[in-house]
Amino acid sequence: MAAADRKRLRRARMAALGLAPALGSAAASVPALEVTRSLGALQAQDYGSGVWSLGVRSGLTLAEVEQAVERREIVRTWPMRGTIHWVPAEDARWMCELLAAPRGKQLATRYAQLGIGAAHIDLAGRLFEEHLREPVSRPDVIALLVDAGIDPTGQRAYHLVGHHCMTGLLCQGPIIGRQPSFVLIDSWVPHSRKPSREEGLATMAERYLRGHGPVTEKDLAGWLLKPLGLTREALALVEHQLVREEVDGQVWLSHVDRAGGPRAGALDTSEPLGHSGVHLLPQWDEFLLGYKSRDVTLPPEHFHRVVPGRNMVFKPTLVIDGEVAGTWRRQQGTRRTVVEVSPFVPLGASRRRDVERAAAAYGRFLGADVEVALAEPAKVR
């Protein structure tokens, strides 16, 4: 792919992902519910990473994000891929029922290894229905299982709770102390939407295109963890909202609104390249995990720096104009938070100031003073 096309593709994605322009340039914050609805779902398997995924797109503080949870606008649950995401509260149940429930069959082998049978699943479900009408902290949920004679060790508790989240019975509530809580969706969520199967598929396809495009059909299939046949069915339901562009032999799909109209396309060459800004993105974020292929935004030669074990455990990333340009980590000091940034190549004075502004935005989110420690680039192995 030509460098200019790659840059335009990255710029379009940054805008779709809610990351362009850079945080700090917007005049007002964006509600967490709006961010979550526009992307369809946001990675949230790690709590600190998940709340910053919302914060970096919205301009909200950590406290404000957590208030959106308390107001029952957004929830964390397992809607797809067996992974925790932020989703609009009103969509949590149907998304799990449509996308996650069949995954239980794929977990049968793991359940057998752990000695989890149908009786354990049914008993846990009855316990949850009886005791989780209000949010209950994870340790207290585990205690419920123990009192009922269920051994919670060896990830048994995790899988039993996760199973009933994936079927749409439970979701996570607000943090209690420092622990996640779990609660019945029907008790916690003021109103749950009930779209038909076709309406649900169309909604997921439309939101993914709008919040991630340009993408390939394999990107959507990977995001949903569904076969290409079902993915193409979903795309056919929103055909009138699609813009297709062929670049270097690959067909890219964008939402017509994001693409600028049916003739402009995602990679409109009439516009200047411009800049997407500098961001410090969390460890697990839609920027990388929302796509089957990451080659557009993560240069292959730097993959091992971002995923050292090549095991899907990512480092937080420094992103410059839509491309991963380094990693970072948070170090908590006694008086202030230190953000250690490790760029892949030396940064000029202007980019250093951009990094400091991005770190300051992270500090505002945390409600803490932040100091930047910029490391010298390491040599590529």
Image (spheres, rainbow, N blue to C red):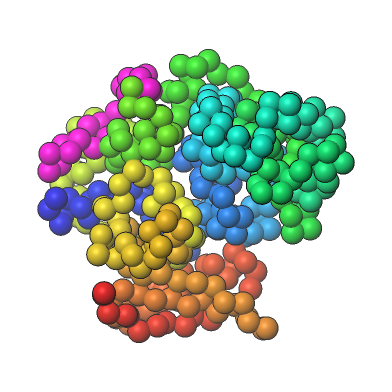
Q: Is residue 250 magenta?
A: yes
Q: Quadrant of residue 291?
A: top left
Position above or below: 197 against 185: above
Counting labels gives 0
Q: Is residue 248 left or right of residue 45?
A: left
150 or 226, which is in the foreground? 150
Q: Residue at x 12, y 53 (%)?
A: 2
Residue 369 point in image, percent of width and height: 61, 77
| Left or right: where 51 falls relative to 202 | right
Magenta residues, start to end: 230-253
**Which residue shows up at 74% across the image and 45% down it?**
152
Name the spot of residue 8 as percent of width and height, x first. 23, 51
Q: Is residue 367 above or below residue 163?
A: below
Q: Could you say which is closer to the camera, residue 48 or residue 15?
A: 48
Residue pushed farthest right? Answer: 147
Regarding residue 123, the answer to whether it shows in the image is yes
Q: Position of residue 358 (x, y in %)?
A: 46, 69
In the rendered view of the protein, which quadrant contains the C terminus?
bottom left
Is residue 29 highlighted in magenta? no
Whether residue 136 is visible, yes or no, is no
Q: Residue at x 57, y 77 (%)?
A: 331
Residue 101 in picture, x, y percent from top left? 56, 27
The residue at 35%/19% (across/down) is 233
